Amino acid sequence: MRTNKRLALVISFLLISFSISAQKSSLSYTVKMENPEWHFFHVSLSCKGIKKEFIDFKMPAWTPGYYQKMDYAKNLQRLKATDAAGRELKWEKTSDNTWRVLSKNADVINLSYEIKTERAFVASPYVDETRGYVLPAGVFLYIDKLINHPVQVRIVPAEKWNRVATGLDSIPGKRFTYKAADFDVLYDSPFLAGNLEELHPFYIRGIKHRFIGYKLGDFDKDQFIVDLKRIVDAAVNIIGHIPYKNYTFIAIGPGPGGIEHLNSTTFGFNGTNLKNRDGYIRTLHFLAHEYFHHYNVKRIRPIELGPFDYDKGNRTNMLWISEGLSVYYEYLVVRRAGVSTDGELLNALRGNILAFENKPGKRFQTLQQASYETWSDGPFGRTGDEVNKTISYYDKGPVVGMLFDFKIRQVTNNKKSLDDVMRYLYKEYYQKRKRGFTEEELRAAFENVAGVPMAEEYEYVTTTRELDYPTYFTYAGLRIDTTTKILSTAYAGFTLRNKEDTVFVAEVDYESPAWNSGLRRGHRVKWINGKKASVLLLDKTITDASPGDKITLTLYVNDSTKNTDFILERKKDRPFIIATMGDPEPLQKQILESWLKG
Ligand SMILES: [Zn+2]
């Protein structure tokens, strides 16, 4: 065997110089929360071996998993930079989120600053007398161009707090001290400090899973852990591989929202919601969603979602996969775990169908556009417009996912399913190619698994074409009622709200009688049929009226008033009730069974 000595020399030289520079430079953070009632973290950074004329320290503008600009930089205050001798170094702001420290080749630079916190929310750092939630993207500065540098973090909880929860590896022998291979990992590993409660850990395929949090509340914790374990097991069974060494569910206290991470999830949680069946299933769906994300988005991911651009954010047309299919799988996983019933699964999907079908946005925005525009429209689509011209990929995404799944099962004689597509994407792009997939690669994955073109199904993604539910539901031996029912009750199509002494139009349904008469959101209403307008009066007027009756509104227009009237129609309803067929063919029966049971 011939070797190229020169090349070997160059390589060994490179390896040596890399290992020297890796040894030489270090970044270690300490986060203190000495007076938590003042709502700020005190952060210090010891930065060694990065000798430069100046160093640009940057704060991310957003946090992965929450696709909105958060402007964390505005919370940073009292920045001070010093060298090893304690001499102060000058700094200047060079952009909204960049602090340039004139380090003049100093070997050691110490930074200290405060992070002011305002709102207890899963995408914001927060500290008060009860707990400290360190959302890393809002607390730790990275060095421009050195995002890949390893980093250490020591958390010093407030006095009397006994625990820190995080997905990061701790450094043995050092209290509450952790290491991250780079800042991408750090930004994906929040910390929760406080007097936390930990439930019984459980093991799946020998790997430890923990549930730990602040103010968990009173509920049947043993049963909850039994069910959560089944859910994690059902999710793992879909992909067939666990990519992490341990996993932590971190409950940050009552409140909305959750964010997925590489080997943890942080989420608002209130155990009292688990006392009724509905709240129990909803909470477990939510946790299954966040958990399933460690596959779908953290590892099975659109190519645009990595490496992250912490300044600008990363736009992609494929959040309908990352979010929409995570909703779809949250229902399937909880059902396959044996925790929810068939009826609860179908009802959850029906909820998404109703939410999607009842918004005019379905005529204006495609799933791809909703994915791309989430940064401007918000995670659930835009609100506050005269007409809602946006959709939510949380509603249409799971429904389209189900149609894709049923189609694949039908054309492959139930030999393949959406699960095969997910497994393929995991193996091919995450494990083998170590990157995300493009739109073309995603489509090819669907079509290769199905073995047929999926042009029609793809139109549900790229256009606003009406979803043909009955065809796809039939594949699984399910019936869905898509007819429009004409009810005998009267319908006007608008709502009112009171603000101090004034009554405003709150919402107007698109193309309703009220809409067609020119009534719009924000109009000020004086009278309804000559009587002083109120929310109650409108309710009573519509309840007492019959279709065909006229309603007259007197509106304030500038300094005078104007009458507008319209004829009430019959209320319409599309209930989208889903039921199983009485006499399914063998294939339909098989598809339904394997879809439900996995
Ligand atoms: Zn999600």
Image (cartoon, rainbow, N blue to C red):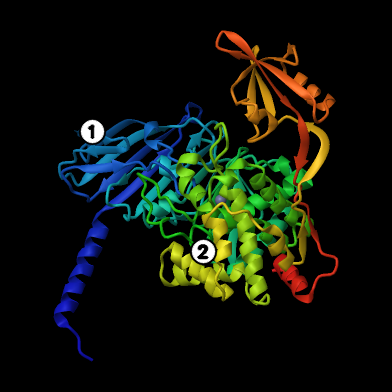
- Residue 421's x, y, as percent? 56, 69
Which residue is denoted by mark 1 in the rendering? Answer: 92
* Mark 2–mark 1 distance (CA, rounded to whole Å): 41 Å
Badge 2, how many Cα within 10 Å: few under 14, some, many 20+?
few
- First in sequence: mark 2 or mark 1? 1
Amino acid on which disc 1 is placed: Glu
**At 17% from the left edge and 83% from the top edge, which residue is drawn?**
4
Which residue is denoted by mark 2 in the rendering? Answer: 245
Q: Please indicate whether residue 555 sits to the left or right of residue 272 in the image.
A: left
**At 62% from the left edge and 53% from the top edge, which residue is drawn?**
466
Q: In the picture, which quadrant includes the N terminus?
A: bottom left
- Residue 540's x, y, as percent? 80, 22
Badge 1, how many Cα within 10 Å: few under 14, some, many 20+?
few
Query: Could you say which quadrant of the image residue 86 lies in?
Result: top left
Q: Please indicate whether residue 527 sits to the left or right of residue 540 in the image.
A: left
247, above or below 441, in the image: above
Question: Count of labels shown?
Answer: 2
